[in-house]
Amino acid sequence: MYDKYPFVAAGDSQECSIGWETIAARLQSCLRGHAPKLCIECYPGVFTSEIRDGLSGQLQPVQIVHTESLLYTPDEIEAMLAGYLPDDPVFGVMNSIEIADFFDPQKLADAKTAVRNHQHGLLLIVGIGAALLRDETALLVYADLARWEIQMRQRRHEIENIGLENRDESAAAQYKRAFFVDWRAADRLKRKLFSSIDFLLDTNVPATPKLISGDAFRSALEHCVTRPFRVVPLFDPGPWGGHWMEKVCDLPTEGVPNYAWCFDCVPEENSLLLGFGDARVEIPSIDLVFAHPKALLGQNVYERFGAEFPIRFDFLDTMGGGNLSLQVHPLTKFIREHFGMDYTQDESYYMLDAGEGAQVYLGLRDGIDPQAMIADLEEAQEGDFDFPAEKYVNQFPAKKHDHFLIPAGTVHCSGAESMVLEISATPYIFTFKLWDWGRLGLDGRPRPIHLKYGVENIQWDRTTEWVKKSLINRIEPLGSGAGWREERTGLHQLEFIETRRHWFTGVVPHNTNGGVHVLNLVEGEEAVVESPTAAFESFIVHYAETFIVPAQVREYTIRPHGAAIGKECATLQASVRTSS
């Protein structure tokens, strides 16, 4: 019953125009005057040539301005970014680069003058940074694209980074540059344009563009923060991946060795589907965070994190697979000094399911010699030596509904035969692998190991007894009512996320208390989320589905639904902790 394509109903079908011919006709009706100007701002990764070809045949522009012709040369761009993209296969440094910084100032100024002085016929401006050229008379279209589709295009070598000729570069290298530079710069411009775009263009499916008005786009986003919703889950194979999600989430198996990850609530990566009748318009879910951060996150969370979604839910499937890499996450001071991030990836493993022999590696054994462990890790990195993880790292048996807490600096990994709901903060990629069990990635290459960084962040005093006392099943009863009971399950006091589990056969009252909630139905086939005041329509969730309740919703209830009526269900709820 797991829904792989959840959507938020946003309007009638006539609001969405599909296909270049229909879109061109709609835009044509909005272009006025003897010297109309159509400006199409493109997110990095959008196929600008498809937009140009799709519209120019219908609209017959007298001139087309391609913004890539106004950029600095690739060598100049490489030099500009060198300080933010060190010689590391994964990590760079956060920065304040803007889209305008990629442009040759003289070329940009000349193009602006030409746009302003345009006299007759349609002028079409298309590409990254097109909005920098527009004047007040231009019709503004924003061509958007989900991060996941960008990554797929990178893997297929279909696109390049801003201003570069690097289509044949590895997907990992393209992703690194996009993560630290391209997407940040594009998002800064996007946020400035939200209130002024005339149309939004969904370019996720090649040759099937979809257009909605800017007003419909803004109205849909405003509607989303008034009710619970889900983002579109993403599934990906990995060298340790398993097969639990294939069955539970009804995933295709042909041509896919396994499914290792599901990004079930990572708004920077996921999409949000807006329903206009039978049509679905796909936008990056981060657009919602940018547009309504206070309503979505709550005032206190917004003041702490800004327009960033700080809670991440994802799945790690090793059922029939192998161990995750042995790893550690950076301490806050380290991630701030080395990568320019304000907070780090504290996390936890909640066991959605566990097979025979399931275990979690967590913390260090009592009495180990740190220098000996480092020496063995270094020797293993050189090859022809298997790091004896069991000698240095605790192994704890894991069963369904166990919760293991993993504050930054704690050595950890999930073992085989586990189905983990990973609940964490959201700095996305800052994992320091210490040992990867001597295996290769799916591309046949060794996965990057960051031993130097990892060793600098290991907290050597987090040993067996401390881990048992502080990090495993810290279950604390909090309250109960008719047909429900509530427990605190974590996280550790070093982590800013609070998690609570509700077991229920009846109606459970909830209140966001002004802060965003993220929940997963961890037990039971189906539940319904409702408003006590009918402020939003009833919202159905199924087993293992993650959903978001915006801060401004305030009161809501959850109860068993459908086949789950009469059975005990459970949700795991995460929020940003406001007090200890």
Image: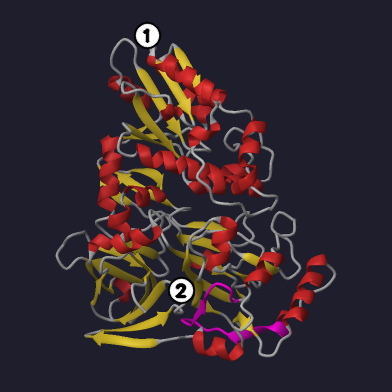
Give the CA separation, mark 2 to mark 1.
Answer: 60 Å
Q: Residue, x 34% and y 58% (percent of image)?
A: 302
Helix, strand or loop status at disc 1? loop
> Depth-wise, is mark 2 or mark 1 nearer the camera?
2
Q: Quadrant of residue 462?
A: bottom right
Residue 48 image position (x, y, % from top left): 51, 29
Q: Residue, x 56% and y 62% (percent of image)?
A: 335
Question: Relative to 150, does residue 358 appear above or below in the rendering?
Answer: below
Residue 199 image position (x, y, % from top left): 33, 33
Residue 555 image position (x, y, % from top left): 21, 68
Per the rendered image, the range of residues in magenta is 390-410
Tell me if I can see residue 53 in this picture.
Answer: no
User: Residue flagged by tag 2: what amino acid is it?
Assistant: Glu
Left or right placement of residue 42 versus residue 449 in this view: left
Could you say which is closer to the camera, residue 98 or residue 474?
A: 98
Q: Which residue lies under the disc numbered 2?
A: 495
Question: What quarter of the picture does the C terminus occupy?
Answer: bottom left
Q: Which residue lies under the disc numbered 1?
A: 119
